[in-house]
Amino acid sequence: MTSLHQRIFEDIEQKIMSGTWPPGQRIPAEHELEVTYGCSRMTVSKALSALAARGMIVRRRRAGSFVASPQIDRTVMDISDIGTEAKVAGHAYSHRILSRRIERLSAVDAAVIEETAGAEVLRVECLHIVDGRPNALEKRMILLDAVPQARDETFETSPPGSWLLDQVPWSEAKHIIRAVAADAATAKLLTIERHAACLLLTRQTWQNGRTVTFVEITHPGDRYQFAGVFHPSK
């Protein structure tokens, strides 16, 4: 069941993303939202704080809240963290490590990421769970010559993506988003039908020309969206 602050968050988010409320639009005052939703000031404030944390609105003391001017390096273009995004939006989040092993980089994988075959990599599979439902299946390679501290990391406390963002600064990243059909193994883990539509995010990050990590994250098509609002260059 959707909580009331989450409903407020989603209603305002929809108005912003659809363009109904353009950048600079003043959000109804907190007392107006209290009346509209029949809730407390604390509930309204929680929803607005989550929107502000996502960079979707700007809260100004005494003036109120306004739709932010969207930044190209947020949402789609940012290196996002699934757990943080879920928690900021008011969802319950957890993760489960499915497998973890150290091996040598195969010639096929080396060609994909343009690295040397035989390099040591840590392979990790992780299931991200939001509000009790699988939200993403993550398959990640971490280059151990670039991130030696990952060798003994279990990722039980912090999922791989979050851990890397905290541990290793990155200087360059590239990602691709495309639609795929779920194979049998993926469908089982994500509790969806085989061949169901999914969104696949493939990302590679570098630190000063050295690959840090390569990851494929598969989301059920009906449980996730990549969103961005852009302005023409001046």
Image: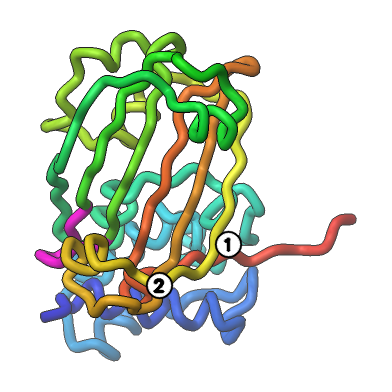
Query: Where in the figure is residue 218, as x and y percent of width and height?
Result: 36, 58
Which residue is depicted at the point 50% across and 70% down? 179
- Identify the secondary structure beneath mark 1: loop
Image quadrant for the C terminus? bottom right
Q: CA distance from mark 2 to mark 1?
A: 35 Å
Q: Which of label 2 and label 1 is nearer to you?
A: 2
Choose top left, top right, bottom left or bottom right for residue 155.
top left
Residue 116, compared with residue 225, is above or below; it is above
Amino acid type at mark 2? Ala
Depth check, front residue: 165 or 19: 165
Query: At label 1, which amino acid type do we have?
Result: Ala
Across and down, in percent, residue 229 comes to: 63, 66
- Name the secondary structure under disc 2: strand
Check if residue 205 falls in the magenta segment: no
What secondary structure prevails in the magenta region?
strand
- The residue labelled by disc 1 is 68
Residue under label 2, please give it.
Answer: 181
Looking at the rendering, the stretch of residues picked out in magenta corresponds to 128-135
